[in-house]
């Protein structure tokens, strides 16, 4: 046997003389397609955008208390606790009666913001 034949025989014997192909390669028989449809219950193969979409529960209907709270806070899903806290702090600074000269309307808006914040905190669990 020549050197090339010996090398070829060694390579075939490492896979027990069975045909092989590159990982993920296809030859029309959908070989490798199964690897693209792997079930990933722990989210190992998801990217950060996918994580943000799955961050919290989906938006409830606008008639529910949670839906109304989303509207009061001016938020859209996905909602995370950090994002909710940031938005709450912004709205409190803007609508606090002391920042608005003791305005009664600002006080009412602040009360509704507090209720919405409490509702969304419970919604996030």
Image (tube, helix red, strand yellow):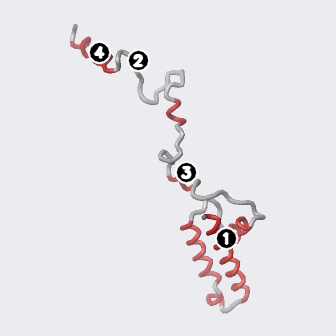
For residue 5, which quarter of the picture? top left
How far apart marks 4 and 2 lie (CA) works out to 13 Å
Q: Is tag 3's residue or tag 4's residue first in the polypeptide sequence?
A: 4
Q: Secondary structure at mark 2?
A: loop
* Residue depicted at 54% across the width and 39% down the height: 39
Name the mark on residue 75: none
- Vertical side of 25 occupied by 54: above or below: below
Query: Which comes sooner in the sequence, label 1 or label 2?
Result: 2
Q: Secondary structure at mark 3?
A: helix
Query: In this rendering, which labeled residue sits more in front, label 1 or label 2?
Result: 1
Q: Up-down: is 17 above or below 50?
A: above
Distance from disc 3 to disc 4, alpha carbons, whole Å, reads 45 Å
State the residue position of label 3. 50
Front one among 123 and 91: 123
Indicate which disc, 3 or 2, sits on the residue closer to the N terminus: 2
Kindly identify which residue carries mark 4.
Answer: 8
- Judging depth in this view, the residue of 14 and 98 nearest the camera is 14
- Residue at the location (40% across, 21% down)? 20
- Which residue does the numbered mark 1 point to in the structure image? 119
Residue 112 found in image quarter: bottom right
Percent from the top left, x then y, of residue 119?
A: 67, 70
> Tag on residue 19?
2
Q: Residues within 10 Å of mark 1 (few under 14, many from 20)?
A: some
Say which quarter of the image contains residue 115: bottom right
Label 1 element class: helix
First along the sequence among labels 4 and 2: 4
Badge nearest the viewer, 3 or 2? 2
Tell me: residue 32, above or below residue 59.
above
Q: Is residue 106 above or below residue 87?
A: below
Q: Position of residue 67 (x, y in %)?
A: 72, 65
| Residue at image coords 54%, 36% | 37
């Amino acid at each position: 046997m020549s050197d090339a034949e010996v090398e070829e025989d060694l390579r075939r014997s490492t896979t027990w003389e069975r045909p092989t192909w590159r990982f993920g390669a296809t030859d029309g028989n959908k070989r490798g397609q199964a690897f693209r449809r792997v079930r990933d219950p722990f989210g190992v193969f998801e990217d950060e955008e996918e994580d943000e979409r799955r961050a919290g529960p989906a938006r409830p209907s606008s008639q529910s208390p949670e839906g109304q709270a989303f509207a009061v806070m001016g938020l859209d899903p996905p909602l995370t606790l950090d994002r909710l806290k940031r938005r709450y702090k912004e709205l409190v600074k803007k609508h606090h009666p002391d920042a608005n000269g003791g305005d009664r309307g600002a006080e009412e808006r602040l009360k509704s913001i507090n209720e919405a914040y409490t509702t969304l905190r419970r919604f996030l669990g």
